[in-house]
Image: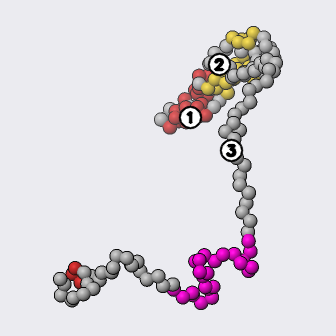
């Protein structure tokens, strides 16, 4: 037994009978300005509380709504893919996309950023009297290809 006598468990802890809940079922008083709760615990809508209707449920899910319908029998469609001509540093033999004649392209060279960088490097490394060489060598410039028949631009080779 314990030293205190009756109603105490081991080491002085208070024990309760097994058939009673551990906490009393007393309700707390309402806070100031709060309406007291109904006997059921949840305030049911009365005359002063508006009754809001629930929104309608969403339409049922159709598993076939994302399926693409089969194509109808239509006429044959031809798709022409236009690609840029692969050109190099020399004149190229090809069919002109504009006039559709077989030609050898005409080249026009133009200075580019690569040309200016090469001239700047020559000036930087004490070869400043030779700075003009990249401006006369075609391999330091971009090669623009044109059709000699119709003059259409075909492509550029950046060398």
Q: Please, is residue 97 above or below residue 27 in the view? A: above
Instruction: Kindly indicate the quadrant of the structure image that contains residue 74.
Output: top right
Q: Position of residue 65 (x, y in %)?
A: 71, 38
The one of 92 and 112 positioned closer to us in this rendering: 92
- The residue stretch that appears in magenta: 28-51
Q: Quadrant of the C terminus?
A: top right
Q: Residue 78: which quarter of the image?
A: top right
Asked whether, in this view, residue 27 is left or right of residue 152, the answer is left
Vertically, is 125 above or below 37? above
**SS class, disc 1:** helix
> How far, Cα to Cα, is label 3 from label 1?
65 Å
Circle 3 or circle 1, nearest the eye: 3
| Image: 136 above or below 117 | above
Q: Neighbour class for label 2 at 10 Å: few (<14), some, many (≥20)?
A: some
Residue 110 position within the rendered picture, expressed as x and y whole percent measured from the top left: 67, 27
Which structural element holds mark 3? loop
Q: Is residue 146 magenta?
A: no
Is tag 3's residue or tag 1's residue first in the polypeptide sequence? Answer: 3
Mark 3 lies on residue: 61
**What is the number of the mark on residue 117?**
1
Cα distance between the residues tagged 3 and 2: 56 Å
């Amino acid at each position: 037994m314990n030293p205190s006598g009756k109603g105490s468990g081991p080491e002085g802890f208070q024990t309760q009978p097994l058939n009673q809940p551990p906490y009393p079922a007393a309700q707390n008083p309402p806070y100031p300005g709060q309406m007291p709760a109904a006997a059921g615990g949840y305030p049911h809508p009365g005359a002063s509380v508006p009754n809001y209707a629930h929104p309608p449920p969403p339409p049922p899910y159709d598993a076939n709504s994302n399926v693409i319908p089969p194509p109808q029998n239509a006429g044959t469609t031809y798709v022409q893919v236009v690609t840029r001509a692969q050109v190099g540093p020399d004149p190229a033999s090809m069919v002109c996309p504009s006039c559709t004649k077989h030609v050898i392209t005409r080249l026009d060279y133009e200075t580019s950023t690569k040309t200016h960088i090469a001239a700047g490097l020559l000036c930087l490394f004490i070869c400043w009297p030779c700075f003009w060489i990249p401006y006369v060598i075609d391999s330091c410039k971009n090669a623009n290809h044109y059709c000699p028949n119709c003059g259409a631009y075909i492509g550029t080779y950046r060398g």
